[in-house]
Every structure is written in structure tokens, then in C-alpha cells.
Image (cartoon, rainbow, N blue to C red):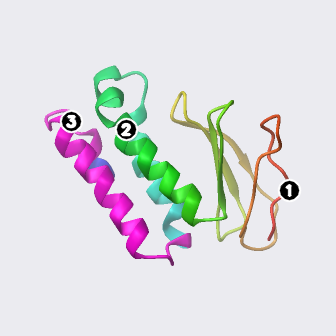
Amino acid sequence: MGDIAVQMDIDSARRSAAIVALVSLVRAHSELERELPAIVEAILRPLDPSVPSLREGCLQASTMALRELVKRYGMSAFHQTTQRLAVGTTAGVIVIYDLRTATKWRILQGHEGPVTALAFAAGGGPLPPFC
């Protein structure tokens, strides 16, 4: 579905539909922790700022999808001011994405167990995760 969302020969309605399908998947299955990093990558791919038409066509659907992920999974958090999304993994890694550039901003390693909850501090820095 992430591949469909970034194909340039597909109209923006079909791209957005692919992202909405990911949202439906997330809503229907609460046990997607292992797949969460791949789902986030698929949602972020069409937000590449170097392709403005792609980003504009998928921004609303991608925003809805990311809100749903943060709402459903305590291992993810969003900081509005910095436009950063943090996603904890079952492998004990935290990936922080910069949504303005749709890229990985930081990868935090060293946790000995799965990250089950995390949050941002008021200033935008990540708080220690709960493993």
C-alpha cells in the first residue's frame, strides 16, 4: 500500500485511498506492534517534500493515519511544535521522524526490551521510554 501511495502515475485519490486502507488495517488489528515501523514508513513515503504534488495529495490521509497510530499505540508519540513523531519498536529501538522532511531524524538504541510507551517532553525532547 505504501508503494501505491508514491506511484506518480496514480491519481491522488487512489494514493490517499491506499493510506486510508492502512488506517483501516490499524483500526481492525490491535496487535501490529511488530509491523508499526513498516507502517509508519509507508505512511511517510508520500510526504517527501521534494515532490510537492505527491505530498499535497496525500497530506490529509497521512495526517489521519499518523493520528490513528498515536491514538492506538502507546509506543508512538507526536510533538506538534517540532513536527516529530517517535515510534518505539519491539526490538527496543526508538525511531524519531521529522515530519517536515519525512525522514528519520534520530534512532535511539540500547533498550533491553520492547518499548511499550513513550512521550515527548514539553520542549520536544523524548522522555525516557517505558520498556
Look at label 2 and name its amino acid: Gln
Q: Which residue is mark 3?
A: 12
The residue range painted magenta reads 4-33
Q: Which residue is mark 2?
A: 60
Q: Is residue 20 left or right of residue 36?
A: left
Q: Is residue 15 left or right of residue 122?
A: left
Nearest to N terminus: mark 2 or mark 3: 3
Q: Quadrant of residue 33?
A: bottom right
Work out which residue is located at the far right of the displayed protein and give it: 128
Residue 112 location (% of width, % of height): 81, 71
State if disc 2 and disc 1 touch (CB < 8 Å): no
Look at label 3 and name its amino acid: Ser
Q: Estimate the spatial distance between the alpha carbons at disc 3 and disc 1, rounded to whole Å.
A: 38 Å
Q: Residues within 10 Å of mark 2 (few under 14, many from 20)?
A: few
Q: Is residue 10 magenta?
A: yes
**Viewer-closest of 81 and 5:** 81
Instruction: State the residue at coordinates (57%, 59%).
Output: 71
- State which quarter of the image contains the C terminus: bottom right
Q: Is residue 30 magenta?
A: yes
Residue 106 location (% of width, % of height): 70, 41
Q: Which residue is mark 1?
A: 128
- Can residue 46 be seen here? no
State if disc 1 and disc 3 touch (CB < 8 Å): no
Q: Residues within 10 Å of mark 3 (few under 14, many from 20)?
A: some
